[in-house]
Image (tube, rainbow, N blue to C red):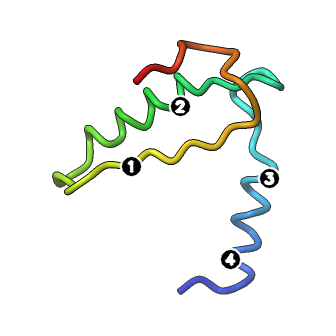
């Protein structure tokens, strides 16, 4: 288990991480493509695969999301 200080340090690192896309960009298609690539490299075959998407607006950057 992680100590509370470890969790706080991790949260701080996430808060201070630079954005890799322009501010205001919401690239849902890019996120989905990346998630699918990660699932394809999983070391086992899951019974089901779920990608939970939360964004801050309409997709306005990168490739368009698709089914």
Q: How far apart are marks 1 and 3 (CA)?
A: 25 Å
How many numbered marks are there? 4
Quarter assignment of residue 20? top right
Q: Distance between the residues labelled 4 and 3?
A: 14 Å
Identify which residue is drawn at 17% across, 54% down: 44
**Which is nearer the N-term, disc 4 or disc 2?**
4
Of badges 1 and 2, the one in the foreground is: 1
**Which is nearer the N-term, disc 1 or disc 2?**
2
**Which is nearer the N-term, disc 4 or disc 1?**
4
Please give the residue where the numbered disc 1 appears in the rendered image: 50
Marks 4 & 3, CB-CB < 8 Å contact: no
Q: Residue 42 in the image: x percent, y percent?
A: 26, 48
Q: Residue 65 in the image: x percent, y percent?
A: 51, 20
Please give the residue where the numbered disc 3 appears in the rendered image: 15
Marks 4 & 1, CB-CB < 8 Å contact: no
**Which is nearer the N-term, disc 3 or disc 2?**
3
Please give the residue where the numbered disc 4 appears in the rendered image: 6
Marks 1 & 2, CB-CB < 8 Å contact: no
């Amino acid at each position: 288990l992680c100590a509370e200080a470890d969790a706080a340090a991790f949260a701080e690192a996430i808060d201070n991480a630079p954005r890799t896309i322009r501010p205001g960009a919401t690239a849902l298609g890019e996120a989905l493509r990346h998630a699918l690539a990660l699932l394809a490299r999983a070391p086992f075959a899951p019974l089901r695969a779920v990608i939970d998407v939360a964004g801050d607006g309409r997709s306005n950057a990168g490739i368009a999301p698709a089914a």
